[in-house]
Image (cartoon, coloured by chain):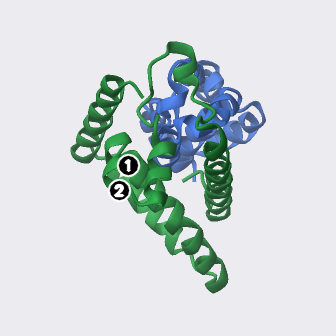
Amino acid sequence: MALSRNNLYSILLAASVAGYIWLYYCITSNLSENKTVEVCLIKHATNLPCPSCGSTRSIISITKGNFIEALDLNPIGYVIALIMLIAPVWIIVDLISRNNALFLFFQKIETFIKKPKYAIPLILLVIINWIWNIRKGL
Amino acid sequence: MEAQKVDMFLMSNGKFFESHQMNTVRERLIALDDSKWAMISTIQFKDPTTSLIVSILAGSLGIDRFIIGDSGLGIGKLLTCGGFGIWTIVDWFLISKATREKNMQSLQQFLY
């Protein structure tokens, strides 16, 4: 594995912090302008949404308690919300107890999803979600 | 192994590795037993140019990371629209090096 434990933890922590800052920025600016800044390269280039477009809006709906609306916007929002909730806590617990449970878990997941019998259904799910996103016109 | 064989290997596979690794690879290969030659000459390496093209075309979906075997990072890229578009652009410049490092890892299994 190329990724060492500390590398993985710093990447994950930075990603979650960036996610929280982005979420805070979106929620605060959403109240005044009712419009979020779109950062997706694919959407800018092709005018079509990418598989994870709408996940920001989905997470915002989750924070407001509209769980069905969140699922309707983009189910990937739930995955991201789970990672954002669990990852920082797990990393801090690991760092304090000098453990590497999250790293081992990450490696297990990585070998797990490389197997075709899990990879192919997951790829299909992402593609179905993508088609759904395009039809919804996010 | 014979120096001639090793040099032939390095000539045909040189582009798959970092330039600063070449000397170590050469020394290691010369010190290696001849019986491992069949294995080493059949390893499939990943082309840095291919991963660069994939990174430019489909980097926002994380497919470049999936191709070189970093499935975890690939999922991260896929879920976040290519890391808000920033990671995509950063990876245009990092993916060749990452591919070469992955190649070095797959060779290292046989070297040590």
| Placement of A80 over or under B24, stated as above or below | below
The residues bearing labels 1 and 2 have C-alpha atoms spaced at a distance of: 5 Å
Q: Chain of mark 1?
A: A
**Residue sitting at 25 percent across and 35 percent down?**
A124
Residue at point 63% right, 56% down? A20
The residue at which mark 1 appears reads as A70
The percent position of residue A69, horizontal first and vertical second, equals 35, 47
Callouts 1 and 2 close, C-beta under 8 Å: yes
Q: Which structural element holds mark 1?
A: helix
Say whether residue B18 is left or right of residue A16: right
Q: Which residue is mark 2?
A: A67
Label 2 element class: helix
Above or below residue A95? Residue B82 is above
Circles 1 and 2 on the same chain: yes
The local crowd at label 2, few if under 14, some if 14 to 19, many if 20 or more residues have their Cα within 10 Å, is some
Q: Could you tell me which residue is drawn at 30 percent across and 52 percent down?
A: A68
Q: What is the crowding at mark 1: few (fewer than 14 residues within 10 Å), some, or many (at least 20)?
A: many
Quadrant of the rendered structure where residue B82 is?
A: top right
- Residue B79 appears in the figure: no
Q: Nearer the viewer, residue B89 or A117?
A: B89
Image quarter hosting the N terminus of chain B: top right
Which of the 4 quarters of the picture holds residue B28? Answer: top right
Q: Residue furthest top?
A: A46
Who's blue, chain-wise? B
Q: Residue at x 30, y 26 (%)?
A: A131
